Amino acid sequence: MSKISAFRPGLKTVLKTTTVAGLAAVMLATGIPATVSQSFAEAVSVEGPKVASFADVVSAVSPAVVSVRVQSDIKPANDESNFSFNFGGRGFDELPDDHPLKRFFREFGGQDDMHGDRGPGRQFGDRGDDRRGPGRKPHLRPTAQGSGFFISEDGYIVTNNHVVSDGSAFTVVMNDGTELDAKLVGKDSRTDLAVLKVEEKDKRKFTYVDFADDSQIRVGDWVVAVGNPFGLGGTVTAGIISARGRDIGSGPYDDYLQVDAAVNRGNSGGPTFNLSGQVVGINTAIFSPSGGNVGIAFAIPASVAKGVVANLMKDGKVDRGWLGVQIQPVSRDIADSLGLAEAAGALVVEPQADSPGAKAGIKKGDVITALDGEPIKDPRDLARRVAQIAPGKKVEISVWRDGKSQNIPVEIGTLAGEQIQAATSTDEAEPETAPSEQALADLGISVTPGDDGLTVSSVDPDSDASDRGLKEGDRITSVNNQVVKSADDVVKVLNSARKDGRSKALFQVETKDGSRFLALPIDQG
């Protein structure tokens, strides 16, 4: 037992041996001790996906984008009244020159008033003859600000009409802070576009951008908006095209691009670019319950702006083609009532007297289906395309009338000023002596004859007529484009439509808001 334990090393011996081995392990071959350092794990680093940057586009287009400052001639309140401050106090001249009160009374009372030298009959606040009258210089005050961009190297700038419409003086601020005076070349309220021209004596050449072919833009494409939100100066935001062809009720030529790039007050008139640095739209409106960006902005498409801007640069105004007809959409029910295969085109409610359309023979109840062979999608499509035609040009309009298509040659007129495209009319009719209300009971209406059509005397609230907006007091002037003077006339037209296999009839109705068409089902009874 003791013999065995004699060969077992003690604990102290083991520790000494281990220590010596450890020291030997950290000795270099030269016998010089090496430094021992503590080991740490590497910091987290993840290689992210390659995402396209907008920096190259922004760098290229930013010199072409400007801020637009607008000043207007604000007439002081006391210019047209006998109002006077008549304080009679003293000591205002002793106030510091930068004191708000001193600036206020110098502005509205004149410098002499500061010293109480009003002269006979003058009250504090009177400017005197030397500062009134036709020779008085305009009193310019900042009234608006927006954005714009150079569209040519010689200084033409595109912006919104609503930015500059009330302005008397205009200043553009470039991205490097340079301020330049500009003059208004022309504006167009229908498309909310305007053109300014920088007044440069040294014939400086400016960096400018061009319009894109927005027909190639797809929903989901990236876009970059550059502008002057809230007066902050050049600001860049990015997003996508959310939708095309938006109608926001601003006019007959609404065809907006909807984008979700952040657009705020002050961005109006600024460009929206594609990733090639071309202008696909001009920011003009936002939808915002709060007044700030909620990701819904609207831009005038380049295809609309290009022609308008060219006309404004050349003539300072826009001459548009004019057909002179009041039109409404063709619903599925209306298409069925007229025997049309699809719900497309523009239904003529009334041609305006002496208009190009009326002179060519277009009649109420016609459906305009094509212009020079190109199909018409809806009334907005027709309005835009007619507006783009040069006045005096002859075109061919295809209409659907009496169950068949026919072509009508028309010489396009000139749309003057804010002329309304059409006017409603009334059809004179002899009164019918024997009204027959029961004849239309199956449609949920009863009528009585009047001097200018059949007056709706009652409407069943549970009927299709009520659902489609027919109301008591409305006047029915025609059914399926045939003038009706009595309930019997209506019944004859309806019976004829049923024989032709139609399930609906087209009623022309006059209301206090104008004339319109509605399709009513006639297969009851």
Image (spheres, rainbow, N blue to C red):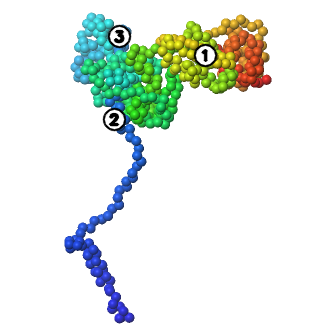
The residue located at (66%, 8%) in the rendering is: 427
Q: Which residue is mark 1?
A: 407
Q: Which residue is mark 3?
A: 79
Q: CA distance from mark 3 to mark 1?
A: 62 Å
Q: Which of disc 2 and disc 3 is earlier in sequence?
A: 2
Q: Is residue 323 visible?
A: yes
Is 369 situated above or below 262? Answer: above
> As drawn, is 285 to the left or to the right of 154?
right
Amino acid beneath label 2: Ser
Amino acid beneath label 1: Asn
Identify the secondary structure beneath mark 2: helix
Q: CA distance from mark 3 to mark 2?
A: 49 Å
The residue located at (77%, 13%) in the rendering is: 488
Q: Which of disc 1 and disc 3 is earlier in sequence?
A: 3
Q: Which of disc 2 and disc 1 is earlier in sequence?
A: 2
Mark 1 burial class by Cα count in 10 Å: few <14, some 14-19, many 20+: some
Q: Are marks 3 and 1 in contact (CB under 8 Å)?
A: no
Q: Which residue is mark 2?
A: 59
> As drawn, is 485 to the left or to the right of 384?
right
Mark 2 burial class by Cα count in 10 Å: few <14, some 14-19, many 20+: few
